Image: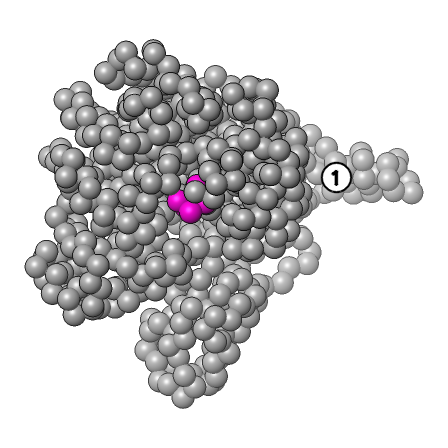
Amino acid sequence: MFKKILIANRGEIACRIIRTARRLGIHTVAVYSQADATAQHVRLADFAYPIGGPRPADSYLRGDAIIEVAKKSGAQAIHPGYGFLSENPDFADACEKAGIVFIGPSAASMRKMGSKAGAKELMAGHGVPVVPGYTGEDQDAALLAREAQRIGFPLMIKAAYGGGGKGMRIVRAAEEFAANLESCQREAKSAFGRDRVLLERYVENPRHIEFQIFGDSHGNAIHLNERECSAQRRYQKVLEETPSPFLTPELRAKMGDAAIKAARALDYVNAGTVEFIVGPQGDFYFMEINTRLQVEHPVTEMVLHLDLVELQFRVAAGEALPGSLLRNKSVPQDGHAIELRLYAEDPSQGFLPGSGKLQRLQLPAANAHVRIDSGVIEGDTVTIFYDPMIAKLIVWDRDRPSALQRMREALAQCAVTGPKSNIDFLERLVRHPVVTEGRIDTGYLDRHLAEFLPADAAPDHATLFAAATAVLLDEEASAPQLAQASGDPYSPWARADAWRIGHAGKRIVCFAHDGQRIEVDAHGSEGSYELNIGETRCQIANAHLADDVLTAEFDGEARRLRSEVDADGVLLHDGERRARLARVAAFAYAKSAQTSGDRITAPMPGRIVLVKARPGDAVAEGQELIVMEAMKMEITLKAPRATTIESVNATPGEFVEADAVLVRFETGK
């Protein structure tokens, strides 16, 4: 076994690899960019070395610099994690040339999978089912259009190199093909350096089911059962689980055999994943092999009680796969596991990636049923340079309904303040019938996204009364400390109960929603209140707030809610849904500024990819004006209305900051 390894990655996967290495007594070496100098993986590792600037191209993609650190530090092996250099055969070759073990498959295996077109041909030759399509090297646009007509619509355009949902488009009509081809090729060129695409028949309402494979240098190849990843948004996995609620034992066996055939076709060594697309009738086709550890590998670990990273270490060190895994044609699973990805992103703005300091980050405590994989803690910053993942939440229980309930409970304990997050979206996801009944397909979220996004409706009176109660209790609890800090701690004016000479007085708790002020009038103190919103009244009794839990009787009905109060607002959670209410000062309130509508600004820092607007152009509502790239995704900025362009302040290739004015419109037009 190795004595020292280098992790050529960052974030949660680097931290996760470090934990296994530490358990096995292996010293770890971290590398980091300027943006990650204080990151968690740097703090956890035994040794850490800087490798360049914040952009991945200047740091985590610099294979030469990483190998130099490995030599300098005495690392015997490099674990690439996922992303970055994990599927780069040139880097694997460079490691071997430097006498350093690459913890992953051989460069030869990766090269066979580096082209989706070549991979499909190879798989078909080894008896693995593949989707009909075009995989040729001729990329003439006219030829591709003819091939598209031959295959028929709908069809999928895919980047021939790479993955992760980049460079993929579904085209449903011939007239949409040219524009989608250009966009797909441009995105592929940006993400993977090559713009070659392939075309394939699009299977309607498919499921995404993948099989974890492992091979060793002794000629053994196995699969470790499936993971279903059908809950996707724009080809990005949102929820992963095992076992699949769709597979029958017979179909599982057929797909498992196909996965092993795929592994043997590559002489595969170490961890990999064979991804299949599965039709509603159980017909399945090879999609690709990810020649690395997957983001969602923890669900497999939870049901098999295995550490896949340890298995990677041992196989890379030359050991054979354990006999206990080789003796069984299929490995028995224990219970059901589900994973969700908590991101800094804004679902209400098209899941726009976010960045900023995590002023508050609360996650459930890890135990036998709950696992948290994260690369950040409260106070850390989610940067604009990398994937905005905050944490992976993984739960396990004896069956799928119980695991879903565990996940709901885990999500209820999550809180993020700072960048916006997708918590609300995830909570709706795990309660939606299409998920609870196991009926979701890969396109459902994109077709029915509104069903998973919270409506921006005004809070109801019950929510407002609960929030006001929490604020009143929090003010009363804070009053002694505030009074002690004042010049006269025993003054009745320092009390939080609105005391006035001769009577207890009235307090006003104010919230704001959609630019409107909402007042709650309050009388009483110490957990007994009479609250009024206009003509609506509510009597509160036995109210208590401790450890972020509010208990009270509202007009005689006992309720228990999770409640977090700060200067900016209140977060309530009743076990099924959460509500956030912004607080405003009772006697100082200003309406939020309104957008003038005379400009388009950058929604976040990023690079300008395409400028389709020119001064003097008359544009229609919804017309594409600017395409920019941020956090590994393209963002299209459109005209908010029919108008005329006055000026354009954007150039392709230019890096712009958030809120930079990119387009101005002529006023009054």
Direction left: furthest residue: 150
Mark 1: amino acid: Ala
Residue 166 screen position, x and y as percent: 35, 53
Determine if residue 74 is in view. Answer: yes
Q: Is most of the magenta stretch helix, strand or loop?
A: helix
Q: Position of residue 157 (x, y in %)?
A: 23, 56
Q: Which residues are magenta?
A: 88-92
90 in the magenta segment: yes
Q: Which residue is mark 1?
A: 496
Q: Residue at x 34, y 11 (%)?
A: 324
- Residue at horizontal 52%, vertical 20%? 1
Foreground pick, 573 / 387: 387
Q: Position of residue 413 (x, y in %)?
A: 52, 30
Q: Quadrant of the C terminus?
A: bottom left
Res. 417 in view = no
Q: Image check: 630 left or right of 331? A: right
Label 1 element class: loop
Residue at 41% x, 16% y: name it. Answer: 305
Q: Residue at x 41, y 75 (%)?
A: 611
**In this rendering, position of residue 41 left or right of residue 214:** right
- Is 449 located above or below residue 261 in the figure? below
Give the residue at the far bottom of this rendering. 616
Q: In this rendering, is residue 288 above or below 25?
A: below
Q: Is residue 173 within the magenta segment? A: no
The local crowd at label 1, few if under 14, some if 14 to 19, many if 20 or more residues have their Cα within 10 Å, is many
Q: Nearer the viewer, residue 186 or 395?
A: 186
How far from the left and from the top, in percent, is residue 488?
A: 91, 40
Quick check: 390 left or right of 482?
left
